[in-house]
């Protein structure tokens, strides 16, 4: 009898071990606290939707049915907390990581993932340095700041007719990087940069720098930073009678910006670009995703959720193709991704891990809503 019980115990233990092997852990990191937690939650929802759908499909890898588990971490948009979150996921031996949201957290975290051999796909980090460190584990599914800032700089001069431009950045890797690229392109297109000012990603009072800028009579102001800072800045511009157009990258280009500005944005005052964009038949694919997202979470997509969704699916597609969720085995397959059909368009990676032929979408705001102006590649 004792022998029979021990065999049963052994069988149960073996069954549990086999089940544990079938769980594939995917990490996700974004700011779930702090001023841009609304964007972090948007990203996490994109990841959760992808995981839920994959589990509903019953995916097999290497002949075994697998269950995907999302391990979500909060980096509060802080580089140190981001590194701690990355180390935690590495210690938990995740098969891959989708994140981080910010360049300032993605860049330091990328070394930790590289050292651990864990593939990392950022859905939103745009600083060029992120994929230029020589790490084989680092990928992104959006265009970088050279494309983003450069396009906005040329647009300011060639389309908006701006001749005198002031530049402000929040001193983060993202904010400073996109502002540098904007300034370079605007100058090359013939604009005069009348001032370069600095703030932080936690500031709320911009009276001093805006007063300084007002005295230089700019046609446009470019802000490198996020919507939580840009919103109050726009409100204070109005209070000071500073009527210049405000421009920014994808960090300000959100559905929440109008509300964050105290609903003070007037039509055709704000121009921004989102890293990514779709045209033609792909618009319906993306709109269908947005409807599905809203039905599941009872809220609209803010910004990057579709790119997170695609990043998770691209990662899993590489695992399926490689017949393994072992990072060492599926990483070479992931790197060779060339024509994955995502909701954000076709996804393929170049030798650095950057998305090929990355698109940008230019937007303005009318009646408090984002209005699509053009998709640029």
Image (tube, helix red, strand yellow):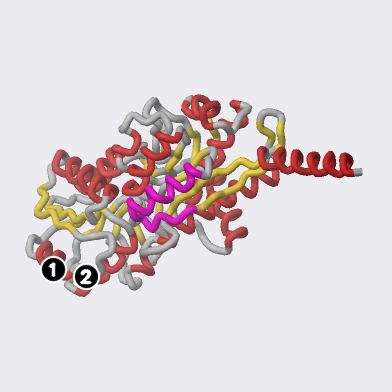
Quadrant (top left, top right, bottom left, bottom right) of the C terminus? top left
Can I make out residue 126 in this image? no
Question: Residue sitting at 30 percent across and 55 percent down?
Answer: 271
The residue that mark 2 highlights is 205
Image position of 20 with respect to 347: above or below: below
Residue 135: % across, % down:
37, 31
Around disc 2, counting alpha carbons within 10 Å, would you say few (fewer than 14), some (14 to 19), or many (20 or more)?
A: few
Per the picture, the main secondary structure of the magenta-coloured stretch is: helix
Can I make out residue 204 in this image? yes
Reply yes or no: does residue 80 show up in magenta: yes
Residue 284: % across, % down:
55, 46
Residue 309 lies left or right of residue 83; in this view the side is: right
Q: Quadrant of residue 285?
A: top right
Q: Are marks 1 and 2 in contact (CB under 8 Å)?
A: yes
- Dot 1: what SS? helix
Is residue 104 or residue 178 the one in the foreground?
104
């Amino acid at each position: 009898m004792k022998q029979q019980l021990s065999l049963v115990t052994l069988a149960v233990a073996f069954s549990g071990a086999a089940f544990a092997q079938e769980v594939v852990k995917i990490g996700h990191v974004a700011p779930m606290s702090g001023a841009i937690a609304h964007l972090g939650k948007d990203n996490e929802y994109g990841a959760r939707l992808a995981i839920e759908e994959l589990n509903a499909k019953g995916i097999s890898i290497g002949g075994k049915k697998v269950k995907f588990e999302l391990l979500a971490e909060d980096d509060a948009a802080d580089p140190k907390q981001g590194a701690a979150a990355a180390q935690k996921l590495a210690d938990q031996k995740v098969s891959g990581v989708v994140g981080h949201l910010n360049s300032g957290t993605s860049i330091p975290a990328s070394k930790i993932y590289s050292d651990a051999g864990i593939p990392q796909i950022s859905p939103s980090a745009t600083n060029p340095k992120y994929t230029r460190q020589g790490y084989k584990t680092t990928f992104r599914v959006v265009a970088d700041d050279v494309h983003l800032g450069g396009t906005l700089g040329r647009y300011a001069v060639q389309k908006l007719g701006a001749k005198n431009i002031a530049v402000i950045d929040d001193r983060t890797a993202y904010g400073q990087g996109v502002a540098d690229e904007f300034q370079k392109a605007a100058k090359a297109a013939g604009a005069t940069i009348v001032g370069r000012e600095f703030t932080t990603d936690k500031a709320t009072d911009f009276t001093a720098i805006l007063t300084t800028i007002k005295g230089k009579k700019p046609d446009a102001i470019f802000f490198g930073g996020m919507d939580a800072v840009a919103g109050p800045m726009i409100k204070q511009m109005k209070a000071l009678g500073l009527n210049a157009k405000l421009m920014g990258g994808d960090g300000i280009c959100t559905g929440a910006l109008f509300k964050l500005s105290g609903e003070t944005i007037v039509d055709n005052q704000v121009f921004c670009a989102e890293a990514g964009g779709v045209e033609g038949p792909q618009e319906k694919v993306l709109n269908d995703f947005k409807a599905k997202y809203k039905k599941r979470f009872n809220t609209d997509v803010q910004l990057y959720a579709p790119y997170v969704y695609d990043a998770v699916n691209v990662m899993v597609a590489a695992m399926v193709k490689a017949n393994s969720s072992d990072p060492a085995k599926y990483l070479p397959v992931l790197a060779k991704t060339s024509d994955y059909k995502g909701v954000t368009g076709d996804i393929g990676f170049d030798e650095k891990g950057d998305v090929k032929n990355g698109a940008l979408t230019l937007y303005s705001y009318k009646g408090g809503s984002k209005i699509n102006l053009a998709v640029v590649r």
